[in-house]
Image: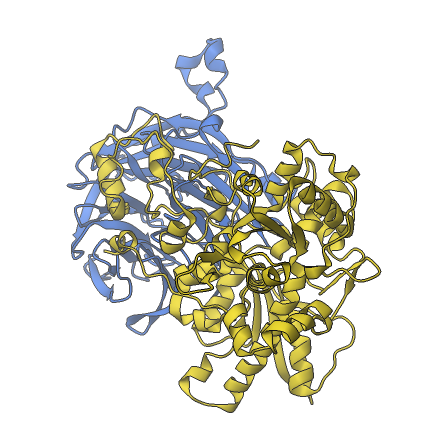
Chain colours: A yellow, B blue
Amino acid sequence: MSSEKFSATLRIGDLNDYIAPSQGCVVSLKANSNPNPNTPPTSSSRLDKFYAENPATLGKAVKPVETEPVKISLKDCLACSGCITSAETVMLEKQSLDEFLSSINKGKAVIVSVSPQSRASLAVHFGLSPLQVFKKLTTLFKTLGVKAVFDTSCSRDLTLIESCYEFITRYRQCHLTTDEKSKLALPMISSACPGWICYAEKTLGSYILPYISSVKSPQQTIGAIIKNHICQMLCIRPEDIYHVTVMPCYDKKLEAVRDDFVFQVEAQGEKITEVDSVLTTGELLDLVKSRSVDFASLEESPLDKLLANAAEGGHLYGVHGSSGGYAEIIFRYAAKTLFGKEIVGPLNFKTIRNSDFKEVTLEVDGETVLKFALCYGFRNLQNVVRKIKAGKCEYQFLEIMACPSGCLNGGGQIKPKAGESAKDLIQSLELKYMENVTEADPLENPIIKGLYAEWLDEPGSEKAKKHMHTEYHPIVKSITSQLQNW
Amino acid sequence: MSLVDESFELKELQVLEGHADRVWSVAWKPATGFDGVPAVLASCSGDKTVRVWEQSPSSGSFQCKAVLEETHTRTVRSCAWSPSGKLLATASFDATTAVWEHVGDDYECVSTLEGHENEVKSISWNASGSLLATCGRDKSVWIWEVLPGNEFECVSVLQGHTQDVKMVQWHPNMDILFSCSYDNTIKVWAEDGDDDWHCVQTLAEANNGHTSTVWALSFNATGDKMATCSDDLTLKIWGSDLLTIQSGNGSAPWKHICTLSGYHDRTIFSVHWSREGIIASGAADDAIRLFAEDGDGLVLNNPSHNGCDLEFFVVDEPKYHLLLKKDKAHDMDVNSVQWSSAGNRLLASASDDGTIKIWELISLAGDQKPPL
């Protein structure tokens, strides 16, 4: 097994995450990665210049080279303002395959929730359909002792409904009231991308956070459903459930360990984590390989329909949009709710600067009343953030994802095969994503309707706010990074 | 008659004092210093300010015309004029890049570019002034597009270097970007035709590259040669087939031409190639050195190489000679050397000693001037 990958060490190098740990990381990375092993900075002038250019590292460069790997927990990483996001470079004890496998053996009720992007990645890799992949994964996991295999496109429908209601609330607040706070109601920015959230909290801070939707991501939503509600239906105590998600993205691991996603049923009770562990698609492939399983020839087990978008006829259903469809679903809902316009057929997303920046508008009587944008990748993200800061953002909603091409291109997905370009792979994934998946309105999802009826009352209710919404916190600059500012 | 056959003197014309801390970088304003337009020079410093100096038409001496302050909150590491000279961009350790416009007698900060995580180390405008590149300690290289109304849009954030990026420099006439780093490499970046930028070449130790931090790089006037300088105490000359690049038949790789070693015994922080072909270096030994290529660029004509097979391998290599070494050019490290592009053979240098010096290269061979 890929033991070098899962040591609890901090690694840097050869990674394609969109930003690597900065040199301001509280843990000295340099000690382990001196780029000039043959030319240590011995000449006094070089040291002078090194300190002149890197005042915060004063004293660091002369430290003896550490031979032990430096340990760092994801929580350290979240709390530190030293760098932006680097989940892919941070290996963790609690988020590995080993931990997952040992939890099964410890007798916990292990539940796995699989993202549709991960299914698409595996489907392309093995030449199967997403449905086949889902059924074979169910077989694989159940053989290992997993109790249930769920589908985050199901919880995503709940996320989308809450997001639609939040948008309408924000829109009305912005248009009907004039106080200072109302100005912060729009644009509303999607919250599902943990890379973006991490960047916003660490680097952008208080001026951008009020715009970010308070709705939890599909990963955390399904965690909340399982540990607050489904556990009761299954008659399992939430603390006895070990919940694992399979995600296209390493940054989802950072999301799972946020304090906001830990709760207690009773004041003195055990702390319950919505998502105990996150495996990336690539790590799941490692599991398949390590078990010497011929994945394509695995049996296809019936799906756990309790939390899976699987229709009676057996096919999968869900929303269009391989990064979650936030802009599209909210746009359609807002057009109908605010302006009485039912949009039939596909939305006309226009490419603005590049394929990762697209906008869609609604005109009523020749006037543009709604303008939404998809904004993927770090460079496009920079530009909308600049616009918001300058007060020149003309959009009411922004679907922001840190990765170019969005979630199908997440850092945790299976890498292109030899000779295959990254662009070709993305195209295959886009096609595969909706292969034999029926487009369906989240509001019509019977499972979600059931959750509201039995548990959450209605969209935007107090219960929904408690379980399905969260908060964001600007990260206060650490001493280390403050030191850099003299 | 070539430059190397002449005798030169580097004459100190003036010491510019005013900065309260080390001076990191200087930049001559384009299209100044000739046709009656007084020469203008910008300098930036650890004192968080930028100073703009102008040559008096009557006395010929430089005076500080403006101090750009209260914008950057930390060291200003480098400064660069747009090709038109209308805008001045400044890169600071405060993680921002500021863009200044000359309005009346004043310089106004018209835009601030944020995005780097920490220290911004260098900035460069492309030949047309439509793109601005920045780099910094966060190991990234950013490309910004200049839009009307002093608006800037991020076009690309390039990750590739594994350490602090010391300098970015656009090719003098093509939209190809070069960066050099603490990771000992020089990277070449080009647009891929799909509105994104990629690293098309890395010049590393394995390519006869540097074995320690690459501090700076500079191009000759035609843009077919590049000089780089390093903490490994060498200057390296690289060449590329410009016609291949210009014809659009893919990118012509840059190849190592020669290494100038044995001339420096301390880190070389700055290198700059004059339009007439003189390479200046500024180093940690407080000295400035000037180099030039042999007249016809062929060692073949050197009689000492006749008849030796081994030497014959290198007959096509241009040979560079030390024209002069100015010892104690400054009291401390020379951080930056910049030739004026006005053809007046003026060189500006910036030092840890807090001063800027203006030098004139004077030919000692009477009235004889080399062909420009």
Residue at the farthest front position: A235
Q: Is residue B221 among the parts visible in the rendering?
A: no
Q: Nearer the viewer, residue A127 or B136?
A: A127
In the image, residue A270 above or below residue A285? below
Q: Is residue B292 among the parts visible in the rendering?
A: yes
In the image, residue A224 above or below residue B127? below
Q: Picture coordinates of residue A203 (x, y %)? A: 40, 60
- Which of the image's four quarters has the N terminus of chain B? top left
Q: Is residue A135 left or right of residue B247?
A: right
Q: Picture coordinates of residue B29 (x, y %)? A: 35, 58
Residue drawn at x 39%, y 47% is A22
| Total count of labels | 0
Residue drawn at x 51%, y 67% is A384
Residue drawn at x 74%, y 81% is A342
Q: Nearer the viewer, residue A215 or B238?
A: A215
Where on the picture, by quarter, is residue B295? top left
Q: Nearer the viewer, residue A476 or B210?
A: A476
In the image, residue A50 above or below residue B258? below
In the image, residue A396 above or below residue A126? below
Q: Is residue A122 left or right of residue B12?
A: right
Q: Is residue B134 left or right of residue B323?
A: right
Q: Picture coordinates of residue A74 (x, y %)? A: 43, 49
Residue drawn at x 37%, y 55% is A79
- Which of the image's four quarters has the C terminus of chain B? top left
Where on the picture, by quarter, is residue A353? bottom right
Q: Picture coordinates of residue A95 (x, y %)? A: 51, 45
Q: Nearer the viewer, residue B64 or A351?
A: A351
